[in-house]
Amino acid sequence: MSYLDKFKLTGKTAVVCGGLGLIGKQVSTAFIQAGAKVIVLDVDEAKGKQFSAESGAAFERFDLSDVTHLDEAIASLFKRHSQIQIWVNVAYPRTSDWGHGIEDVPAESWQRNVDMHMNSYCIATRAACEEMRKAKIDGRVINFGSTYGVVGPDFEIYGGTDMKNESTYAAIKGGIVNFCRYAASYYGKYNIRVNCLCPGGMYDNQEASFVKAYSLRTPLRRMGKPEEVASAALFLASDASSYITGTTFMVDGGWTCI
């Protein structure tokens, strides 16, 4: 047995929904380097075509937040690309007024964001799993949760900054975490694995005071890097994790251990 070969995705087709984002682009790149045919789904056509030209990934414009048409869109995608073994939901759809404190979130905004993000992840997961089940594909679905879907936020780290911790995010990510357990339990008998990957805070040029406070709160004393999350996604997508399903996989520098 070659353990290194278990991490390869040669001969596999992977869809990365939200594959142009901070983490999504690294996930797409990791899968390409592991030998997969990668289909990047996102809403920005210009960036998608550029990434496709640079990386060799296929690109299709796809709006995950359009929940009423997801079943039809995903069925069409599977029909056109035949065997899709890996599906990743890493998109971060949100409304233009995102970033309220809990006391100020309009009910309409709350509802819209839950539809755009949590409901779209759940519906897309069901649709992808159903297509895999019907085609008897040994599938792997990875949904992106968050540390804030597992634990509450430490509001002290935001002190002295203009940053907000959106309360809707906790509801969304908490729902995604538990839906992954449900889907893993239901689809396991069809050899379809469903896992939830939960990153901690990623460094993205945040205010220096926030970066310092976050790092001091984290056992590894720093924020994460997108490529570190992509490595975990590669593990969950590969045969190296063949007996892992229904897990909440933390990539958070130890944030949730204390």
Image (cartoon, rainbow, N blue to C red):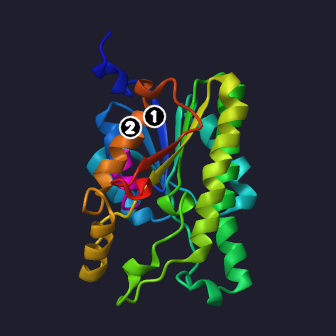
Instruction: Please give the range of residues in magenta.
Output: 21-28
Q: Residue 3's x, y, as percent?
A: 31, 18
Q: CA distance from mark 2 to mark 1?
A: 5 Å
Structural crowding at the residue carrying mark 1, measured as other residues with C-alpha within 10 Å and reported as few (<14), some (14–19) or many (≥20): many
Q: Amino acid at mark 1?
A: Ala
Q: Is residue 127 visible?
A: no
Does the magenta segment cover residue 94? no
Judge by depth and name the residue closer to the eye, 257 or 224: 257
Structural crowding at the residue carrying mark 2, measured as other residues with C-alpha within 10 Å and reported as few (<14), some (14–19) or many (≥20): many
Q: Residue 165's x, y, as percent?
A: 50, 78
Q: Can you tell which quarter of the image residue 104 is in?
A: bottom right
- Most distant residue in the top direction: 1
- Most distant residue in the front direction: 258
Residue found 64% across the figure and 85% down from its top = 105
Residue position marked by numbered label 1 in the rendering? 237
Q: Can you tell which quarter of the image residue 253 is in?
A: bottom left
Residue found 31% across the figure and 20% down from its top = 5
Q: Residue 73's x, y, as percent?
A: 67, 49
The total number of labels drawn is 2
Residue found 61% across the figure and 29% down from its top = 192
In the image, residue 75 sits, relative to residue 144, either above or below, namely: above
Q: Residue 34's x, y, as percent?
A: 32, 32
Does the magenta segment cover residue 25? yes
Q: Is residue 174 visible?
A: yes
**Magenta span main SS:** helix
Judge by depth and name the residue closer to the eye, 163 or 134: 163
**Horizontal side of residue 219 vs 69, given as left or right:** left
Quadrant containing the N terminus is top left
Tag shown at residue 234: 2
Tell me whether circle 2 and circle 1 mark residues in contact (CB < 8 Å). yes
Q: Amino acid at mark 2?
A: Leu
**Horizontal side of residue 72 vs 149, given as left or right:** right
